[in-house]
Amino acid sequence: MVLDWYTITLAQLQDLWAGAVAFVPQLIGALVVFVVGWIVAVIVGKVVSDVLRRVQFNQLFDREGFRKALERADLRVDPSEFIGGIFKWVLLIVFVLAAVEILGLNQLAAFLGDVLGYLPNVLVASLIFVFAVVIADIVGKFLHATVESAQMGSGHYVAAIVKWSIWIFAVIAILLQLGVAKDFLLLVLQGVVAFLVVAGGLAFGLAGKDVAGDLLREVVRKLKG
């Protein structure tokens, strides 16, 4: 009886040791993948942040007044660092998923797979945000200069309406990309489009009132002459 107990215990310890020895290469491989992934993710995040700083993305963000609005809410956000951080964590999760699969942790791998499947939406939303900042600034400046050069006046208001239109569409596009209340957002989008059509017509009407007045006076003068 004692001998059977000893044999069973010894067999269990041998199986445990064999399993541990077999697991060591997997553990080492997972650690290597994780470390390499961490290094790559940090480098890519810094590169993205540096590129955005070089194209003066932060200055665009400041010019639109978003930084001041966030600071009033006691939020300190570096836009370039924020976008770079998103890229870093996306890559890190990719490598963590690979490491988890090496370890054979199937349930955790499935969960991370679901998270990873959603992250492209976050990346696309971030890109929409970046392009909205850049395009709103460029289009706003172009329209302001065009309206003012035509001596129509109210160029600032026209540019502001167009810039806010771009921002509103960008925010709706970001929320739709993230899957937030799609039906409600589509309804809001229809209302926003209707509002912008009316607001744009009023803005251009106000901007061109001086020109219209001059044309009308010229017509009246010619009729009298």
Image: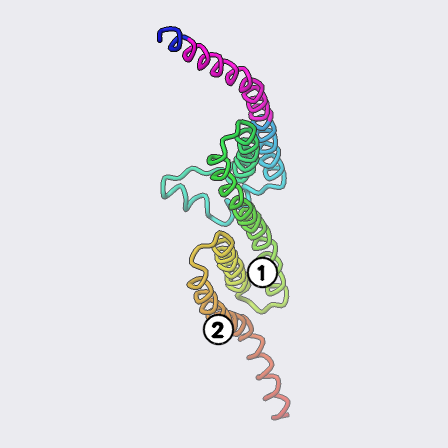
Q: Residue 209, percent across and down?
A: 53, 75
**Residue at (42% x, 63% y) in the render:** 184
Q: What residue type is labelled 1?
A: His
Residue 225 part of the magenta-drawn span: no
Instruction: Tell me the SS state at disc 1.
Output: helix
Mark 1: few/some/many CA within 10 Å (<14, 14-19, 20+): some
Residue at point 42%, 58% (across, down): 181
Q: What element carries label 2?
A: helix
Task: Please give the name of the residue rendered at 48% of the width and 72% of the height, measured from the top-left corner.
Answer: 194
Task: Give the vertical position of 160 relative to 199 (above or below).
Answer: above
Q: Is the magenta stretch mostly helix, strand or loop?
A: helix
Q: Name the residue under label 2.
A: 198
18 in the magenta segment: yes
- Residue 109 appears at what percent x and percent y? 50, 35
- Would residue 76 appear left or right of 116 to someone viewing this image? left
Q: Position of residue 104 (x, y in %)?
A: 52, 29
| Amino acid at dot 2 | Val
Instruction: Give x and y (percent) for residue 156.
Output: 52, 61
Instruction: Identify residue for label 1.
Output: 144
Q: What stretch is highlighted in magenta?
A: 7-36
User: Taking 207 as reference, is 163 above or below it?
Assistant: above
Q: Distance between the residues labelled 1 and 2?
A: 19 Å
Q: First in sequence: mark 1 or mark 2?
A: 1
Quarter of the C terminus within the rendering? bottom right
- Residue at 59% across, 41% down: 56
**Residue 152 occupies quadrant:** bottom right
Crowdedness near tag 2: few (<14), some (14–19) or many (≥20) residues, C-alpha within 10 Å: few
